[in-house]
Amino acid sequence: MLDKNGIAKRIAKEVTDGMYVNLGIGIPTLVANFIPQGIEVMLQSENGLLGMGPFPISGEEDADLINAGKQTITTLPGSVFFDSAMSFGMIRARKVDLTILGAMEVSENGDIANWKVPGKMVKGMGGAMDLVASAKNIIVAMQHCDKAGNSKLLSSCSLPLTGVKCVKKIVTDLAVLEVKDGAFHLLERAPGVSVDEIVAKTAGKLIVVGEVPEIED
Amino acid sequence: MPLNKVVKNAQEACADIQDNMTLMLGGFGLCGIPENCIAELVRQGVKGLTCISNNAGVDDFGLGLLLHQRQVKKMISSYVGENAEFERQMLSGELEVELIPQGTLATRCLAAGYGMPAVFTPAGVGTEVAEGKEVRNFHGRDYLLEMAFDADFAIVKACKGDTMGNLVFRATARNFNPLMAMAGKITIAEVEELVEPGDLDPNEIHTPGIYVHRIFKGEHYEKRIEQRTVRQ
């Protein structure tokens, strides 16, 4: 089984040289820590920054310089600021190569629900709907099951949707899955996790072909 | 000097904001918010406001201060976490809340400032955001028709401005500020530094003064940090 850092580390392998990437809040933010040395990647923060750097050293926090999670950050050589319309303009125009975000549910046709639970306080979708509606490639980082043990990979989402037919890949604590042709396709399994367990914990249509390799460290 | 937009302070800038008006307020979280005008609105006690702002502040700062005094009738935002009083008013039905995608929020400001009545965007297609909206298919993809905002006042915060209302923003405190500056019927800009015409490099001005009606130097900026994070 993978912990949060393990999920982030596996997703970081999907990030390649020259990409512009938007990281969501939570596990996706951790992906930045595992991007391989020696490749050039620009992180987009939808509040208006391309080229997001690491957290500042203590004493150098700048109230005017935050990421979309409202955390203090820094810039890097080549960084650029812009307003929110341009930020979502580059997202809508599909200039951002990869979007990584969390989810409460994903369906076998790639629908995603991650913003609202009926009956609970709704905080809002932020930029998630814009991102999933336009991203060229979306990878979801999430736990395979919710806290009650229910599968989050479903035949259809039960929660209000954030976007339709948009998720391409999912990395969970148990597996790496591709979403295509109306089904989850098992690509890799987490260390020590059996195919049977993944089958049992995936409620939507799951396709398993041949030997499924373990995720390499 | 009709092109001199300078007013004395927040009190003079906000003097004619009345009950039940629609305001746009710049900022992302607590970053780049018009602190001095918010404080003045709290002091004035104007009520029944509709506020268009990406977020709703925290309990004791930003728009949270207006919410606390029950001055807001409706919030139009993309994300409203981090605010317990907001949650209480929303769940009790005292406060009306319209949640819209962040890019749609930005683009509806942009449309107003560019003189366009509406725009098409794919955000929210197939979700409850699309309910009641016109859907149009262009080149095989569906888009929602979203209307430009119509606000009585836009209240923004810039790092620097000159007396003619030209504005320069700093870092990610830019966010919604230049968009809202373009979109208000009357735009109020508060700045950390107020300079003379000619002091700003015309190449570096983000918002042309034509969009700005009133400008003043804010008396005090707390510039509170919501999530102070440092390198380990």
Image: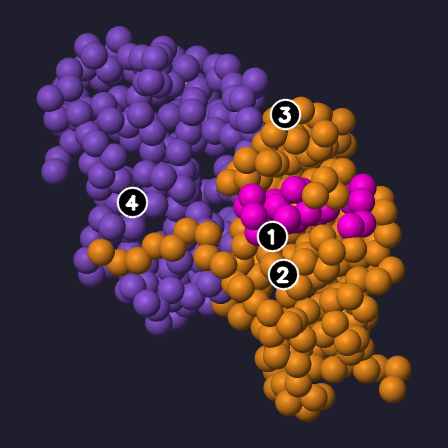
Question: In which chain is the residue bearing label 4?
Answer: A
**Mark 2–mark 4 contact, CB under 8 Å?**
no
Given residues A146 and A50, the one toward you in this image is A146
Judge whether B145 appears above or below A197 on screen: below
Q: Secondary structure at mark 2?
A: helix
Q: Secondary structure at mark 3?
A: helix
Q: Which residue is mark 3?
A: B91
Mark closest to the chain's N terminus, 1 or 2:
2
Query: Does mark 4 fall on the same chain as mark 3?
Result: no
* Magenta residue span: B45-68
The three-letter amino acid code for the residue at tag 1 is Gly
Q: Which residue appears at 26% of the width and 58% of the height? A: B231
Magenta stretch containing residue A133, yes or no? no
Gap in angstroms between the C-alphas marked 2 and 3: 27 Å
Q: Which chain is orange?
A: B
Question: Is residue A104 among what the camera can see?
Answer: yes
Within 10 Å of disc 4 (Cα), the crowding (few <14, some 14-19, many 20+) is: many
Q: Which residue is mark 1?
A: B62
Q: Colour of chain A?
A: purple
Question: In which chain is the residue bearing label 3?
Answer: B
Q: Which residue appears at 29% of the width and 50% of the height? A: A32
